[in-house]
Image: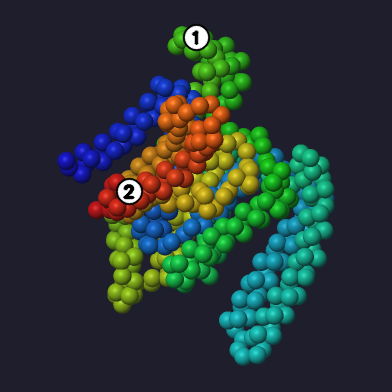
Amino acid sequence: MSTQVRDTALFGLVAVLLIGTGMIQGWNSALLILNMGLISAIMALGVNLQWGFAGLFNIGVMGFVALGGLATVLVSTDPVPEAWQAGGLRIMAGLVLGALTVVAAVQAQKRLEGRVKTIATLVILVGGFFLYRAVFDPGKVAVEAVNPASTGNLGGLNLPILLSWPVGGLLAAGAAWVIGKTALGLRSDYLAIATLGIAEIIIAVLKNEDWLARGVKNVIGLDRPVPYEIDLQQDPGFVERAASLGLDPVTASTLYTKIGYAILFTIVLLIILWLAQKALNSPWGRMMRAIRDNETAAEAMGKDVKGRHLQIFILGSAVCGVAGAMMTTLDGQLTPGTYQPLRFTFLIWVMVIVGGSGNNFGAVLGGMLIWWLWVQVEPLGLGLMNILSSGLADGSALKDRMIESAAHMRLFTMGVILLLVLRFSPRGLIPER
């Protein structure tokens, strides 16, 4: 079987799984899996840029995804004038002072020597910290006291939510630049630990800084790039078209909105995939793979290894930030408590490894296939356990235990799939050429 036929057959398998889901469980379920599969494929592309192209072991993916989610709030929600009047300017001034403190400390490290450098840096950092808190804290308290039941934050810019997708990428790219300047000099295992810790810090900030995006109170009712179902159901023209297709207005409206999301997500995925393929097949892409395979040899040929690592780290993180903004848009709410770095970062890495590290189409395949399995394994496992325990008496400890164990089938199945792929196809289902 040729490589092209095999790859087409694998994508055809994913299509069959989605169509089968629609026919058995309903097209709403199939479209929901498709939409999250498309977003997962974009996340997998971002990780593949970093690992497959450059060998960077980043396990802080969810931190950049969370920044993308934050962008939807900062861009699309309405501003809160009372909060801005109460303490918005103090918060902005405090953040500026904090940034200036860091810049001044860095400049002191560069320009001074000996003991003077150490003393000056300490004075700048300690003095800047207290000055920052003196300005920032009163503004924060004042903002969070403004109608905390429904707002308690500064709000956003009231712009179309589609603009938040590139903004999410920019926020993630900015954070990646700061992280990369300090962490990319670390060895791969230390880089993994550092990125995981930084992701936890980002998520902790989102959870605890209510003035920014309401923290764990969550932001609900975000704008949508597709119509609301209730509006479609009240549109006589839409109701008439739904009836002509033999659908009731409620079912037709939910299908319509999910198809709208699927079209938008597919467009973004195709654009990012096209750009990633162009990069992979360009001289820049060949240089990145040369650096990945042998940093010493690449550096001896005059390549700026650290600079290129920073570049690819920023690009991959930006892609994850775009995916995070898309995921929050699909959910219609920002819930920082759901960002679990270890759990979901593991899932994205499974997508990249199973699909084929270093192959963009493999990352897309892995994202779609693994997400379908992640959603379907638990109900399939429950059905399997019910069949296996059907001969046992109701109420028996073994039967109850077997049925309860179905809740753990997801992680167990992901581990088994990962082991099987590493054993029989260590380069993934669609390996790097």
Does residue 239 sit above or below 132 in this rendering?
above
Q: Where is residue 63 in the image (x, y as percent from the top left)?
A: 56, 54
Front residue of 142/402: it is: 402
Disc 2 from disc 1: Cα separation: 48 Å
Q: Where is residue 42 in the image (x, y as percent from the top left)?
A: 43, 45
- Identity of the amino acid at label 2? Leu
Does residue 26 sit above or below 47 in this rendering?
above
Q: Do the residues labelled 2 and 1 touch (CB within 8 Å)?
A: no
Looking at the picture, the colour scheme in use is rainbow
Neighbours of disc 2 within 10 Å: few (<14), some (14-19), many (20+)? few
The disc label shown at residue 226, or none: none
Say which label, 2 or 1, has the lower sequence index: 1
The residue tagged with tag 1: helix, strand or loop?
helix
Residue on which the image places disc 1? 243
Closer mark to the observer between disc 2 and disc 1: 2
Does residue 258 sit above or below 301 in this rendering?
above
- Identity of the amino acid at label 1? Ala
Residue 333 location, quadrant: top right
Residue on which the image places disc 2? 420
Neighbours of disc 1 within 10 Å: few (<14), some (14-19), many (20+)? few
Q: Which residue is drawn at 67% across and 51% down?
A: 207
Front residue of 408/401: it is: 401
